[in-house]
Image (cartoon, rainbow, N blue to C red):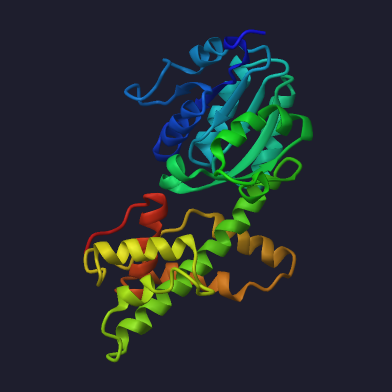
Amino acid sequence: MDEEEEIMQIGLVGLGKMGNNMRARLRNAGIDVVGYDANPAVSDVADLGALAEALTDSKRLVWVMVPHGKITHDVITDLAGVLGEGDLVIDGGNSKWLDDTIHAEQLAAKGIRYMDVGVSGGVWGKDNGYGLMVGGAAEDVEFAMPVFDALRPEGPREEGFSHAGGIGAGHYAKMVHNGIEYAIMQAYGEGYELLEAKDIIKDVPAVFAGWQRGTVVRSWLLDLMVLALNEDPKLDAIEGYVEDSGEGRWTLEEAIEHAVPMPAISASIFARFVSRQGSASPTMKAVAALRNQFGGHAVKKA
């Protein structure tokens, strides 16, 4: 087998903030990426049919990276019409885990394989790598492993990649991941507000920066909080208005279903609801700033 035949090939549907960065990271790793997006300015091909034709491997691999819900449903339906027996589709968006069974069955009717992958890393993933949580069959995971290895962070595979279980397990793990994320951001935001409220504290950004090494609350989210405060120490430029992607709500639905108490995560979600009722809360300004830092999520300017 010559060198050209050994190159892994993948189709990537959705070239937004994360998808475009993923394409770049995969190409930097030597993987042949054919990207499609509804925006022709960033797309490599005209449509999904052209994408399928451009993939020449006997077992074609297509990664879907579009918003969850109807857009994902439509893309899966369209792929079912252009792919065939033995091909593999990966949904790497933030789909609800219950949708994975529907999509897997829909594709299986055409002999097409399916996996779901929860992806964490936001706009920083191009350089830092993406945390990956995978749901699907072991043989499909093995087939796609060169792609997973290219996307995940450097270091031990098990520290940036997990095969969580069968179909739906990847998105379920990402759902819980995001629920935890909500609570951590809320805690940093509340700490920020209390530090700002106490006149004995003269340099709040310095306090957060001083927590980055050696403390038990250090984390990447803390690092991003420091970046946000360096840009706007009083967070005067944004409103304390915080949206949610939906995964926190799904986490609470599951908590109720299984009688798992989640007071911290539930409080963090309800705080976001309060923020949309006109709150100018410094806590929620900090949470909004954090979402913007890691995910590029829009904020409301003050």
Q: Is residue 215 shown above or below 149?
A: below
Q: Is residue 136 shown above or below 38?
A: below
Residue 170 position within the rendered picture, expressed as x and y whole percent measured from the top left: 66, 45
Q: Which residue lies at the image location 43% right of the left edge and 42% below the top edge?
A: 127
| Quadrant location, the C terminus | bottom left
Q: Say whether residue 252 is visible.
A: yes
Q: Which residue lies at the image location 60% right of the left edge and 54% below the top edge?
A: 175
| Quadrant location, the N terminus | top right
Q: Is residue 193 shown above or below 256?
A: below
Residue 2 position within the rendered picture, expressed as x and y whole percent measured from the top left: 62, 8
Residue 261 position within the rendered picture, expressed as x and y whole percent measured from the top left: 68, 73
Q: Quadrant of residue 293?
A: bottom left
Q: Which residue lies at the image location 72% right of the left edge and 19% below the top edge?
A: 110
Position of 11 with respect to 43 (left or right) is: right
Position of 91 with respect to 36 (left or right) is: right
Q: Say whether residue 269 is visible.
A: no
Q: Is residue 236 shown above or below 207?
A: above
Decide which of 162, 187 is in the foreground and name it.
162
Q: Quadrant of residue 45?
A: top left
Residue 233 position within the rendered picture, expressed as x and y whole percent measured from the top left: 25, 70
